[in-house]
Amino acid sequence: MKLSIIIVSYNVRDLLQQALDSLIYAAININHEIFVVDNASKDATVEMVRNRYPTVKLIINKNNVGFSVANNQAISQAKGQYILAINPDTITSADTLQKTIKFMDKTPNAGGLGVRMINAQGKYLSESKRGLPTLWVSLCKFTGLCYLFPRSKIFNRYYMGWINEYETAEIHVLAGAFMLLRKQSLEKTGYFDESFFMYGEDVDLSYRLKLAGFKNYYFPETYIIHFKGQSTRKLSFRYIKSFYGAMFIFAKKHLLNF
């Protein structure tokens, strides 16, 4: 099998339906399977998937086990040469899967790939390509220096601003909203680190891919639409706790050596 698509869902039934419709169309000529892992949604997501998408492999969790655990549940069952971990709040372009798989096929050193992402208004999302969030890189982001010097290799490493929006390039960090991963690479690095409940797991896995000798790529020859932050409200206590907690786990694991 060529491709295993994995979507983790939590109370985003209508967005999930939209995501599935676009993915099914994009994968029409690809030997694939689709997993939906539902983290105890209360909005009839499970019933919708069962009724509308009988071929989708549905994993139902009784509790919200988080993004990493849920993805790993599906990865452990996946038969595809490639694994696509993709958010439910996305719409995939018709040519995205064909083009990205073709690039991965001809780039054997690629462990993972991300694409150009835009929001619902068509605006480019700068998190489509990111650098490793070291202390300096994070400081430049949170103080706003990366926005004052958007193309600087010194001050905007977070968004790797010197790389053009339409330029295929090696990057450090793949966005969790769309991560096309080589299953063989995951067998070497391990799957998502389950210490991360939400946020940070994409940074961690991207870094481990690089440590294992693989490269991560930004591929802008296609795009997805990402309706950001539908599962977690920005600036909520839950968001702040999850985001900064994840960054601390990553720093403790990889950067602080304790």
Image (spheres, rainbow, N blue to C red):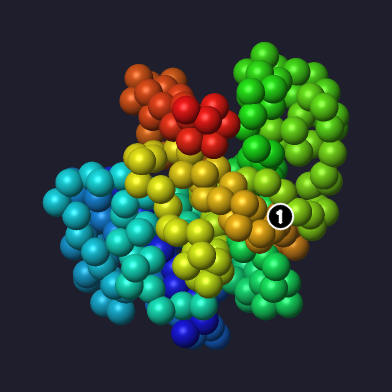
In the image, residue 255 above or below residue 93: above
* Residue 98 as seen in the image, left or right of residue 37: right
User: For the point 44% across and 32% down, which residue is it?
Assistant: 249
User: For the point 26% across and 77% down, which residue is it?
Assistant: 54
Q: In which quarter of the image is residue 50?
A: bottom left
Is residue 123 visible in the rendered structure shown here?
no
Is residue 146 visible in the rendered structure shown here?
yes
> Residue 101: percent from the left, percent from the top?
63, 74
User: For the point 62% across and 63% down, which residue is it?
Assistant: 111
* Residue 49 as seen in the image, left or right of residue 161: left
> Mark 1 belongs to which amino acid?
Tyr
Residue, far front: 258
User: For the point 64% across and 23% down, which residue is it?
Assistant: 135
> Residue 218: percent from the left, percent from the top?
71, 54
In the image, residue 246 above or below residue 16: above
Residue placed most toward the observer, 89 or 172:
172
Residue on which the image places disc 1: 218
